[in-house]
Image (cartoon, helix red, strand yellow):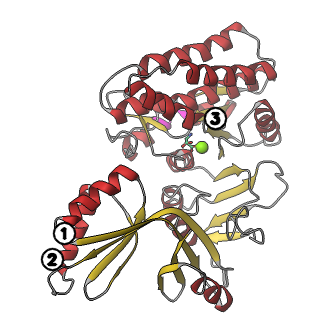
Amino acid sequence: MKIFKFGGASLKNAQGIENVASLLKNHSQDKLLVVVSAMGKTTNALEKIVDLGLEKKDFKSELEDIKSYHHQALQNLELVDPSVQKLIDDVIEKITSEASKTGDFDQVYDQVVSQGEILSSLILCAYLQSIAIPVAWVDARTIVATDESYREGKVDWGKTRQAAQPLKSILEKKIIITQGFIGATSSGRTTTLGREGSDYSAAIFASCLGAQSVTIWKDVPGVMSADPKRLPNAVVFEELPYQEAAEMTYYGASVIHPKTIKPLANSKIPLLVKNFDDPSLPGTHIHECKVDRLPPLIVFKDNQCLISCKVTDYTFVNERQIELIFQALMNHDIHINVMQNSAISFSICVDFRDHKILKLIQELSKHFEVYYNTGLTLITIKNYDAASFREYRNKAGVILEQSSRSTLQVLVKS
Ligand code: ASP
Ligand code: MG
């Protein structure tokens, strides 16, 4: 049994959905569970609605856009059956009612934003039925059990594994279509697993069902040594060890969600990253393997902020002061991308998220003289060679650099 995952870019319109269908047809000999993301940029549009709803502002026109976008797909797929149209309209109504509620932002967020995946999975399922492919729609919230950490649901593996078992008999006869990104608490409230979390969902299903492999279908030819939009000479990795792939995601390579690798590596389930537009391309095979010499991998992380905490009283930075900094980071749930110390200052590089960072700086200012720069880019060169090491160290605008035997990181003014 195999897991296929299709992202929003693959499902952005009727043509994408038809393309998914023909891919599935070509795999009719496999037992398949298909995990989908929301269509196109629907998740962003739903986030906008949550913001407007909580500010008590009107979101009718934004919601109308989402509605007509999905109806347009139905029309182009010639899905004219009123019962299918009603499925979509019911979800739109659900969005209206949930987004009008007041209360905890994160809870409201999950109830609303999760609907994007419900919409895309309903449409894909209806289309496959219309062309006589035997499918079953499964609500992922009845399988993926999480705690109550809204927007960042932590999976209850025991419960999820148990809930997934009945899917095996369905898979004997039908392709299962389900949603990425979403789960539910034990009281039945919807949770989400973090932005771009559908890859992780695919890994959850794979692990719980003992899948033979997971294939993530993307709009790129595989995992590449850099973002080809930034570095046109980027190359595709044929194969990668799990560890290497996991570390890449840590440094910010956005091709796979960071949580995806661990459950797959633990169960030794291979992950294939394949090109949606040209399935004949080999793509990237992530599995247990040894690769002798990988080309340098270059990851750009924009929107970074460098915060330097300087001690003010002619003492040196000591562990007590570092503890204060780490405590403040934990208090605000902020993750460090790079850190560095000198005699009198300790610097951290973090993602710049306005209000969070400004609060952190306020707290740090109670103990230190704090300086910060925003609008920076952190460039990580993993498995550097002499040429790439030279090139990036000597880049204009470097304000911090750090290297180990395999990895160079430079923080530059964008
Ligand atoms: N639709 C969600 C998002 O855009 C989940 C995903 O795409 O993986 O974040
Ligand atoms: Mg997405």
Numbered mark located on residue 324 in the image:
1
Foreground residue among 407 and 359: 359
The answer to whether residue 412 is seen in the rendering is: yes
- Among all residues in the image, which is located at the extreme top? 82
Mark earlier in primary sequence (2, 3): 3
Do labels 2 and 1 touch, CB within 8 Å? yes
Foreground residue among 110 and 358: 358
Q: Is residue 189 magenta?
A: no
Q: Quadrant of residue 223?
A: bottom right
Q: Residue 385, how many percent across, how many down?
A: 65, 88
Q: Which residue is labeled 2 in the image?
A: 320
Q: Residue 202, how many percent across, how many down?
A: 57, 46
Q: Is residue 319 above or below residue 351?
A: below
Q: Which residue is labeled 3 in the image?
A: 171
Q: Is residue 165 magenta?
A: yes
Q: Residues within 10 Å of mark 3 (few under 14, many from 20)?
A: some
Do labels 3 and 1 touch, CB within 8 Å? no
Foreground residue among 284 and 327: 327
Q: CA distance from mark 3 to mark 1?
A: 53 Å
Q: Is residue 301 left or right of residue 77?
A: left
Q: Which amino acid, mark 3?
A: Leu
Q: Which amino acid, mark 1?
A: Leu
Mark earlier in primary sequence (3, 1): 3
- Between circles 3 and 1, the one closer to the viewer is 1
Q: Quadrant of residue 24?
A: top right
Q: Which residues are magenta?
A: 163-167
Q: Quadrant of the C terminus?
A: bottom right
Q: Residue 5, how many percent across, how many down?
A: 64, 45
Q: Residue 122, how many percent across, how many down?
A: 63, 24
Is label 3 in a helix, a strand or a loop? Answer: helix
